[in-house]
Image: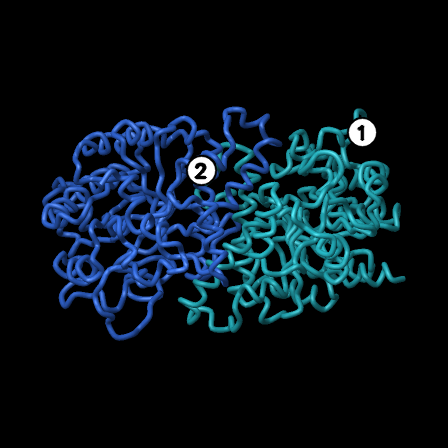
Chain colours: A cyan, B blue
Amino acid sequence: MDLPQGSIDVDLHPMVPGLSALAPYLAPLWRDQIALRGMEGFDTQSYPPNSPKSVRADWRPHAAWPASSVELLREQVLEPWGVARGIVTPLYGVQLVFNEDMAHAFTSALNDWTRAEWLEADPRLAASIILPMFNPEHAVAEIERCAPDPRFVQAMVLVMGETPLGRRHNWPMFEALVRHGLPLAIHAGSCYRNPVTSLGWPSWYAEDYAANQQAFQSTLASLITEGVFVKFPTLKVVLLESGVSWLPAFMWRLTKGWKGVRFEVPWLDRNPFDVVRENVRLSIQPFDAPDDADTVRRVMDHLGSDEMLLWSSDWPHWQFDGPPRLPPGIDAGLARKICVDNALSTYTRLAMETVR
Amino acid sequence: MNVIRPQSAPGRPLAATQGLIDVDIHPRPRSLHDYDPFLSAEMRQRLHTFGIRPRHGFVKGTPYFKSQPLACRRDAWPENGTPASDLDFVARQHLDFHGIDIGVLNPLQPTAQGDQNNPFSVAMAHAVNELQLAAWVDRESRLKASIVVPYEDPEASAREIRRRGGDARFCQVLIMSRTSHPLGNPKYWPIFEAAEEVGLPIAIHAFGYSGWAMTNGGWPSFYIEEVSEHATSCQSLVNSLVLEGVLERFPRLRFILIECGFGWLPSVAWRLDKHWPTLKDEIPHIKRAPSEQIREQIWVSTQPIEEPPRPEQLLDCMSWIGWDKILYASDYPHWDFDDPRTAIPSFIPEAHRAAIYGGNARKLYGF
């Protein structure tokens, strides 16, 4: 099925062409260090720039850095597919930097780059506030700094951090997000503080990419069992580039575990699957199910909600060829929810702007 | 699930028309001294002085405290000793009570699999295997042993497999799911070569300590997280077996995932299928769709049985995995033990239930 009118793409990835692009947004202390120390850029192992997965072949320009300008986004996504709104989330590895102060400075610079070079350039675009991940005070400061601009419609952390996301030291961050009505996006990728599997480092990039599926399960388990959604019942969490079909079986297991050992997490007073259906959303690319309508319908039935999925292209990552197509077995009504309505009810800021 | 209720009446499931085979029973030694006759003086001294040194910090117990003592059923404690340390008690409470025809022993602790010290792990694996024969299998014909291997020393593991492979009292090779490298890593291939050579399946039991954080985003806080992370660790393991090319390189090798859950397996296979074409440049050695390889070479056990909200969802899941790939397991004597009569729901068609109870295991193990 084709995209309905007014579709919203919740997972677009501008690629920073190099550290020099961030230089104008850095204080001299940090700007000077780029050359002084010969810093070589923050592209991460999660998305090696030359990997076919990171950039679809026909989206790799001859002369320019891929996905590096609004013109490329317009030409490759917005215009040909009639996309009404898009949320941009750069995955430049500012969140991997070990020096907390440097990480904070470069993260702020990245957010300013996004605002100046993407949000200012096309009114259809909204953006994620990229959050520093190893100092919650810095994360809160970045939320406070960016939140007054309504074009920032969510904040983003990578799914593989140093400690599980639900841990209590992160709660001030959740408090700030709720206060500003911002969903928390959790995107595929690692800060490489831990091996990407609980069994150590794998041999292949393919295993690194596959490992995101485990990370999303662990992260949700952490948020749920630590009680984040009990303390912040209105917090919305959006899983980006997470895949979808793993969720039901994971929830069966966690719910069964909860029934067995709920004495350990007594604050958890609701069935975890109900919590997830209410508070968690997932982007639809990559959709990890076979390309047949019957299986897709069963997966949707296992999910048990038509409000959880959000459409995304994952530009410029290679998830599909040609124009986007919704999985078979999804009817027009559900397509409309996935591509438009669910995003508007998740992103209240986007909805307000769209109305305006 | 630990349900405190009056002891039910003995009996076996009516649908077990092809036999009742339990692929997951956990024997324990009465004490560490049970291993003494099978250890050298040096290793005996080490066992009783420094003890087992797993890849976590505590001398006794586990880093995530279990929900009950030794993670065992409250009614599984004999008057003297620990659960599943007394053959007569196990025979009475489990084998006789449920009408088990064949039970597969999976010694979990204390076995020193994954110990920080390889020579010690090698010596202990030998002792654990000898003790399985002396204390269990040679005294009870319904029980089969596992070849416990010191998997972090793959060459020594291969020797243990070849030494025992022709002995019909052993029915499989046993590895814990949390290895120090993802299991498909070429480091472990000597184990696979030996297992394929002697024709025994490799059972992966959920457990162990890899030495790495239990999630790829760091250490979780709770036991409930550790329990659900068994599934994620096994997912990484399956990814590794496929993407390293192990299933294709050892086409006659069969893997059994025990107590790992199984609801996640279809999604893992679909994800690999989805990304295999876009990553072919990196992994040209993968010639066949990952889901086909998984469908042919990986078996799962039932306990702890998945409990989706509606019955059809369990049927969907089992049919995606393959009705011929599912084996009944009780996990005796652990707290989340599955009674064969109630754990395999009656909405599963009878022929499939018969296969799960016994038919599939008979074919797989050649019992």
Residue at (9% x, 49% y) in the render: B139
Q: Quadrant of residue B293?
A: top left
Residue sitting nearer the eye, A148 or A124: A124
Give the numbered dot on residue B294: 2
Residue B229 at x, y = what percent? 45, 53
Residue sitting nearer the eye, A190 or A30: A190
The answer to whether residue B109 is visible is no
Image quarter in which the C terminus of chain B is found: top left
Under mark 1, the amino acid is Ala
Q: Which residue is mark 1?
A: A64
Q: Is residue B314 left or right of residue B205?
A: right
Q: Are marks 1 and 2 on the same chain?
A: no
Question: Looking at the image, which residue sits at the far bottom?
Answer: B6
Instruction: Calculate the distance from the C-alpha at mark 1 to the C-alpha at mark 2.
Output: 41 Å
What chain does badge 1 belong to? A
Mark 1 nearby-residue class (10 Å; few <14, some 14–19, many ≥20): few
Q: Is residue A106 left or right of residue B267?
A: right
Give the numbered dot on residue A27: none
